[in-house]
Structure formats: structure tokens, C-alpha cells
Amino acid sequence: MKNYDDLGVFEIWWKSCLDVHKAYSEADPKRRVKWAGPEMSARSSITARQMETWAHGHEIFDCLGISRREEDYIENIVHMGVSTFGWTFVNRQLPVPGEAPYVSLILPSGKFVSYNEESNSSFVKGDAVDFCQVVTQTRNILDTSLKIKGEAARQWMNLAQCFAGRPEDPPRRGQRYIKL
């Protein structure tokens, strides 16, 4: 255990951040690591920490009723959201739809990203921030401008959960964002 006895709360937090940064920067990205949820690779673990920090940060912005300036770093969260398509269903003991919907999103810089096989019958399209808010359950799908088509896409976006743990329902429509 590190000696933090003579440090204040901020200094302890900052020192811990530097320790975590050092450990992850030296780790094999594919090495399996333990944590509160299922084991995952070091790369996935640090992305999950980014996702959690980003999502919980939205709680603060929502309480303050202000919008947050976003950047393309959320592409990691988009990737995690797409990668956990099956998890959303498995976690709820529901059958996983046969094929994941096509996902086409616009990052804050205007750059397009897409995942899965292109389809006109099953897709999620729109703003990457909206997508990240849905898969992290900081927004109800009805509070976004995402375009959704197909039963698998609708079901996924209504239940999406890219984090480990018991199934949780997204917030009710209008519950999480206060526009001033």
C-alpha cells in the first residue's frame, strides 16, 4: 500500500491517477485483469474506466443543467457500446438477435464511424454522443435524435447496457437532462 498519510484528498486522487496510468501504460493490452465484474483485457478495462468516468460525469452536468463539450475520445465508448450488443441481451436472459444492427454515427468533430454490415432494414444512425448516452444509460432513447430501424435495433437501444452488473433499465424519458 502506498503511503498517502501526509496528502490531502486531491493529492491522493492525483497520485492514484498517476499510479493507474503507469500500471496501464506498462501492461500488456491483452493481459486479463480482475475487477468487480467479469475479467477483461487491460485495454478493455481502461476503456471501461473511461466509459464509467464519462457516464458518471454526465450525472454532474445533468444536475447542473448544462451541456458538456464533447470530443472524439468518445469513439472508445462507441466501440464499447457496439461490442456489448450481445451482452445487453445475455445479461437480461433474452435471446441475442441473429445479426447486430448496422451502426453509423457522427463524432463531435464531424468524422463518421460505422460498425457491422451495412443495412437499410436494421440500423442505428445519428450522433455519437447520443449513442454513448444511450448505451451508458445516461439518456432514454426517446431523449435523443438517433434514427433506429428494425426490431433488433429497437430492442437493443431500449435496453442497451455497456457496463457490467445486473440488468438496469435506462432512465425514463425526460428524467436525466434539464435544459436551462
Image: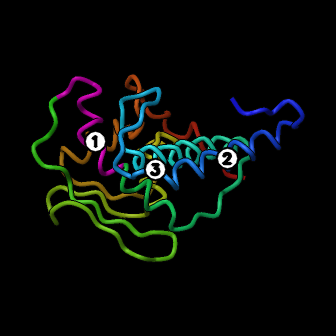
Q: Amino acid at mark 3?
A: Ala
Foreground mark, 1 or 2, reads 2
Q: Nearer the viewer, residue 87 or 158?
A: 87
Q: Amino acid at mark 2?
A: Cys
Q: Which residues are magenta?
A: 81-94
Our reading of the magenta stretch's main secondary structure is helix
Say which quarter of the image contains residue 64: top right
Residue count near mark 1 (Cα–Cα under 10 Å), binned few <14, some 14–19, many ≥20: many
| First along the sequence among labels 3 and 1 | 3
Provide the residue designation for mark 2: 17
Provide the residue designation for mark 3: 27
For the point 14% across and 40% down, the residue is: 97
Foreground mark, 2 or 3, reads 3
Q: Nearer the viewer, residue 141 or 164?
A: 164
Q: Is residue 82 left or right of residue 78?
A: left
Judge whether 11 appears above or below 66 on screen. above
